[in-house]
Image (cartoon, coloured by chain):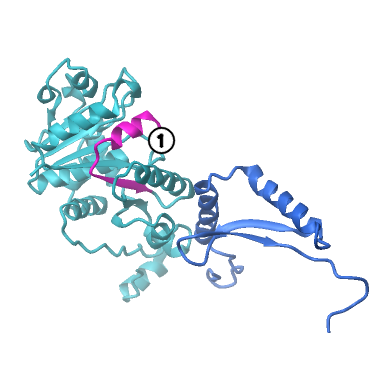
Amino acid sequence: MAGQIVTITSGKGGVGKTTTTANIGTALAMQNRNVVLIDADIGLRNLDIVMGLENRIVYDLVDVVEGHCRVRQAMIRDKRFPNLALIPAAQTRDKDAVSPEQMIELTRELAEQHDFVLIDSPAGIEQGFRNAIAGAHRVLVVTTPEVSAVRDADRIIGLVEAAEIPPPQLIVNRFRPEMVRRGDMMDVPDVEEILAIALIGIVPEDQSIITSTNRGEAAVFDLYSPAGRSFKDIARRLQGEDVPFPVFEAPPPPGMMGRLMKALGFARV
Amino acid sequence: MRFFRGFGAKQEPVASSQIAKQRLKVVLVHDQLRMSPGMLAAIRADLVDVLSRRLDIDREGIEVTISPGPNGDEDQLTARIPIRRGPARARR
């Protein structure tokens, strides 16, 4: 049976598409699936450096669609998992170098040999985005609980539905339970209500994202990373498993009073 | 939504997350309808013209807004149209 082609997009830049693609891809590979990642952000490649594979690029996506190499030659195997590979973006071309038809053909070919083809979409609504969703079986929309990210996510959802792809699913990223508790950040149900699509993941703000990217590793390797755990859950849900969403316990207020209250059992949820 | 922070702190107004949510709902209605900034003003002007042919309308007092409807699946245009009363007749 052919694999699933999944595009990760957002509209707004900087909300975590590339991090999400790298981590879900790695989690799927850890869970024994055959996975290939495609960086569709031509001209601004990032998935390679987040995965720690930046020194291994020989051929890229544009080389493949222009016929300069076979697909296999452009696929960079992950350092840890033989069942995980990356096709990097071209750095010196732009989004017009690839067409939606070429993306459809390439992703269909890859889906014959892999359980999952994950496509990291560029930000925006232009050609790069249209290329990234061409051929997608399903789309994941990443947003943060902030007004401009949610607004852009809404626009993207409209464009995905207009492209006759099934309704996308939502990932709320960079979630901060302590801010939500204070009323300073929208909660996940607020974002769900506004965007009206099904939730597939909640990922908390987590410094291990930065440290793991510094090392060129996915956060899913860090057993103590809450974000890593969330990405592993999303990978399981993508495979049809019913994984309950986490309840995040906000940290106690700073200072002695907070620590005293926590010690006495007045933990905050 | 009001809550206090600590003793003696001043009372906090509506939480910023709720303000964000309300603003998003309104702006998304405008975005989805592809409504240009001038369109509501043009609708308002049209309403003033049409209604003042039959009613004595307080032209300055008309308010026209678009917002999400009470059911989740529709939006609504709401016009508040004050009508001037005749001289010196209070309502019983």
Q: Disc count in the image?
A: 1
A74 relative to A149 in the view: left or right: left
Q: Position of residue B58 (x, y in %)?
A: 81, 60
Q: Tell me if residue A80 comes above or below residue B66 in the rendering.
A: above
Q: Give coordinates of residue B31: x percent, y percent.
A: 52, 46
Location of the C terminus of chain A by quadrant is bottom left
* Residue that badge 1 annotates: A125
- The answer to whether A218 appears left or right of A43 in the picture is left
Q: What colour is chain A?
A: cyan
Name the secondary structure under disc 1: loop
Q: Nearer the viewer, residue A29 or A210?
A: A29
Residue B46 horizontal/vertical position (percent): 72, 50
Q: Nearer the viewer, residue A49 or B84?
A: B84
Q: Where A76 falls versus B89 (above or below)?
A: above
Note whether residue A85 is visible: no
Q: Judging from the image, what is the letter of the chain drawn in blue? A: B
Q: Answer with the quarter of the image where residue A40 lies.
A: top left
- Residue type at tag 1: Ile
Give the residue drawn at x 38%, y 56%: A176
Tell me the magenta residue range. Answer: A126-143
- At horizontal 80% and vertical 57% (from top left) the residue drawn is B52
Q: Chain of mark 1?
A: A
Q: Residues within 10 Å of mark 1 (few under 14, many from 20)?
A: some
Tell me which residue sits at (16%, 56%) in the image. A240
